Amino acid sequence: IAVFVSREDDITVVGLMNTFLPQYNANAHVVIGHKNGHSISVLTGIIIAGVLPGPLYFASLYLRSIILAEIARQSITLSERTRKLHRKFLSMLTAQASVP
């Protein structure tokens, strides 16, 4: 959302593309972009997309270790099949959380 809110007008970007890269036919393609890469909206989008996933990924790994410890703690009351299913489900959730 931040990328689309901060993008420039299409005509402006096509003009910049034709000025700096005339070998590309920008009029024949869909071109979106930013005129100024140092604007607040562009930097906010970069921070959200580039920095925020790191702590969230480490938090999911931390929660995974807590859940695995709880499964191990309740190993007396859970059957072997249930433990395997819980671990497999947790592995799939971790894999899904690591891929955006």
Image: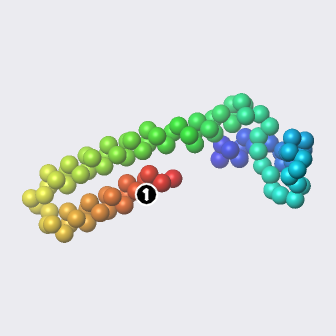
Q: Can residue 11 be seen in this view?
A: no
Quadrant of the rendered structure where residue 17 is? top right
How many numbered discs sit on the rendered protein? 1
Q: In front here: 20 or 92?
A: 20
Q: How crowded is the residue under tag 1: few (<14 C-alpha within 10 Å), some, or many (20+)? A: few
Judging from the image, what secondary structure is the residue with disc 1 in? helix
- The residue lying at 14 percent from left, 55 percent from top is 74
- Left/right placement of residue 53 relative to residue 28 reads left
- Left/right placement of residue 33 relative to residue 19 reads left
Q: Is residue 56 visible?
A: yes
Residue closest to the far left: 76
Residue closest to the far front: 23
- The residue lying at 71 percent from left, 30 percent from top is 38
Quadrant of the rendered structure where residue 75 is? bottom left
- The residue lying at 71 percent from left, 43 percent from top is 5
- Left/right placement of residue 3 relative to residue 63 reads right
Residue 24 rendering spot, x and y as whole percentages: 86, 52
Q: Answer above or below: position of 67 versus 37.
A: below
Quadrant of the rendered structure where residue 30 is? bottom right
Residue 72 rendering spot, x and y as whole percentages: 16, 53
- The residue lying at 69 percent from left, 36 percent from top is 42
Residue 87 rendering spot, x and y as whole percentages: 26, 60
Residue under label 1, please give it.
Answer: 96
Name which residue type carries label 1: Gln
In the rendered view, how is the structure colored? Answer: rainbow
